[in-house]
Amino acid sequence: MKEGQSLTYQFRRGNKLEKENKQEGTKGKKFLVPDTSAILTGSVNLLEENIIVPSMVLWEIAKGKAARILREQEEMLKVVKPQESSIVKIREQAEITGDLKYLSETDIEVLAVALESNGKIITNDYSMQNVAKTMGIEFEPCGIEPIKNEIQWSFRCRGCRKIYEENIKECRICGHKVVRFRKVE
Ligand SMILES: [Zn+2]
């Protein structure tokens, strides 16, 4: 994306993306379609080439705290608006499974984009997963990366820099405040 090109331009790429994906067939990498929470929890690297962002997800995030991060990356994102026919298909199926009342407009759009692009949804939303399952749309849950090792803290005097292993408030040598820091193993 060059500077000055608007998001509406990107939206029009929806059809092109679909064609590209079909042409590539099995040799192409599977598109990943994250929902809003998948992005907000940092479960996906938005700059990976196989990530496509539904336009309403972008819009939801643009209202929130992650807006700045997103703006910085916007030029490099593939933002897609699905066709109305795909939205209708998702709605019909969600009606059948009983999930429609639990789905937001954005949820439906995420599903529709995945349907069009033959992509995989990244979401923890049970209703979205349920509709995806019945339509043969792949999905995987997102989550915050578990902390692999417990954080080890040490404590350091702000005055004389003496390091303590125990959590004390005041340095025994110089009386300055002792603060904790992350021990690097
Ligand atoms: Zn000290």
Image (spheres, grey):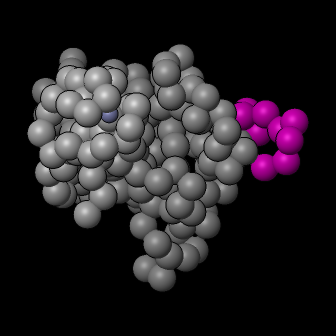
| Range drawn in magenta | 1-9
Drawn side of residue 9 relative to residue 21, left or right: right
Drawn side of residue 132 relative to residue 108, left or right: left
Find ligand 1 in the image and state its quadrant: top left
82 lies above or below 145: above
Residue 47 seen in the figure: yes
Q: How many marks?
A: 0
Residue 115 seen in the figure: no
* Residue 58, magenta (yes or no): no
Residue 30 lies in quadrant? bottom left
Of all residues shown, which one is farthest toward the bottom?
A: 27
Q: Position of residue 74 (x, y in %)?
A: 66, 40
Q: Residue, x 64% and y 43% (percent of image)? A: 73
In-front residue for pair 18/95: 18
Query: Which image quadrant: the C terminus?
Result: bottom left
In-front residue for pair 96/56: 56
Q: Position of residue 7 (x, y in %)?
A: 72, 34
65 lies above or below 44: above
In-front residue for pair 98/121: 121
The overriding secondary structure of the stretch rendered in magenta is: loop
Q: Position of residue 161 (x, y in %)?
A: 37, 41
Q: Residue, x 20% and y 31% (percent of image)? A: 172
Q: Residue, x 59% and y 35% (percent of image)? A: 70
Q: Residue, x 27% and y 45% (percent of image)? A: 163
* Residue 6, magenta (yes or no): yes
Drawn side of residue 56 relative to residue 111, left or right: right
Q: Position of residue 67 (x, y in %)?
A: 57, 26
Residue 107 lies in quadrant? top left
Drawn side of residue 74 relative to residue 91, left or right: right
